[in-house]
Image (tube, rainbow, N blue to C red):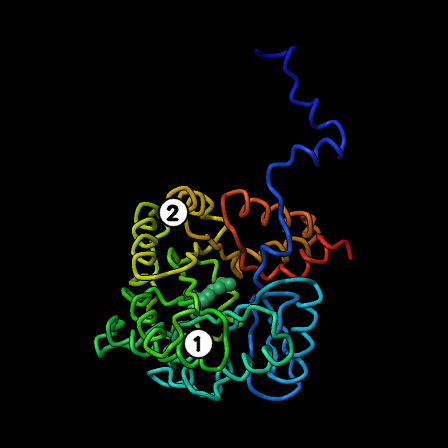
Amino acid sequence: MGFPDNRMRRLRSNETIRRMVRETAISVNDFIYPLFVIHGQDKQNPIKSMPGVFQFSVDDKLKKEIKEIESLGIPGVILFGIPEVKDSCGSSGYQDDGVVQQAIRLIKDTSPEIMVITDVCMCEYTDHGHCGLVDKDGTINNDATLELLAKEALSHVRAGCDMVAPSDMMDGRIAYIRRCLDENTYENIPIMSYAAKYASGFYGPFRDAADSTPQFGDRRTHQMDPANIREALREVALDIEEGADIVMVKPALAYLDVIKAVKDRFDLPVSAYNVSGEYSMVKAAAENGWLDGERVMMEILMSIKRAGADMILTYAAKEAARMLNDI
Ligand code: PBG
């Protein structure tokens, strides 16, 4: 039956009816807020390419931020550390007094209910900016890197984090990290795997924020080719087999089809990373008066949810929470 018996506009005629037929809901429970932590005291450094996002020193500055996150009802954060010293094997990534390890303790002390997730990767800690150990010929040595990733994950868990999120895209790292955590009695710590992580231009602003731009070459030998979706499903299947508890698609906006395909195919919770470039694009356009930043940001978050994400890592979490809480 078509027009005039059917009129689609009937169910759009006012906000109440629109509210009643709305298919997708977004809530503050969906958000994970990324936090950049640095050494030093009393620091809150703005990140130029990401308006509203800062690097925090692990003291009252971070404490205040965490309290705000908690008061907004955001359930979790993901931590990225910027170390003072970088070397070829990223050793400050797995030290007990490393910046992330210190931040975990402070956050758990301040707000024990906040879910503290840590990004596990070498690229913030290596002097060459790569995600693993680099051989003489410039290739990233997959198998030798696994040991370091497991050490890093274990040190985060020992410091008290609630979940680890390996973002390096080395083969076999989920199983390796799972085994290491289990051997150390941490069998109940979940792993959120960056399962389908693409080699994307959208990470540009993050690399400013985390000071992790590769000094040579790129990440195309381990991160995925943006052209591929069937390969993403293989990546996800492998990570699940290896013991992942939550699987991530990253970036989100240009990969909504991948989120949808992963959600349709697998039964695990799916997370999506609304990455730095996706955030900065909206901010830049809004600052120019070219679009309504808040409205577009909510529309993007809604699209990620509609595609099937159960949780969204987003720099817009605080703003979105304020809008959803109407404050
Ligand atoms: C790697 C990592 C990156 C991001 C999260 N974890 C950078 C990269 O792979 O180059 C990007 C996040 C973003 O752009 O917001 N540690």
SS class, disc 2: loop
Amino acid type of disc 2?
Answer: Phe
Based on the displayed image, in which of its 4 quarters is residue 191 positioned?
Answer: bottom left
Q: Taking 32 as reference, is 12 left or right? A: right
Give the Cα separation between the discs numbered 1 and 2.
31 Å
Residue sitting at 50 percent across and 57 percent down? 273
Q: Taking 321 as reference, is 85 left or right? A: left
Measured as percent of width and height from the top left, residue 169 is found at 34, 64
Q: Nearer the viewer, mark 1 or mark 2?
A: 2
Residue sitting at 59 percent across and 88 percent down? 40
Q: Taking 230 as reference, is 257 left or right? A: right
Amino acid type of disc 1?
Answer: Glu
Residue sitting at 50 percent across and 71 percent down? 162
In this figure, which residue is indicated by the disc labeled 2? Answer: 266
Measured as percent of width and height from the top left, residue 120 is found at 42, 72
Q: Is mark 1 within 8 Å of ligand 1?
A: yes
The answer to whether marks 1 and 2 mark residues whose Cβ atoms lie closer than 8 Å is no
- How many other residues sit within 10 Å of disc 1, few (<14), some (14-19) or many (≥20)? many
Q: Quadrant of the N terminus?
A: top right
Q: Quadrant of ligand 1?
A: bottom left
Based on the displayed image, in which of its 4 quarters is residue 193 positioned?
Answer: bottom left
In this figure, which residue is indicated by the disc labeled 1? Answer: 124
Q: Sequence order check: which comes first, mark 1 or mark 2?
A: 1
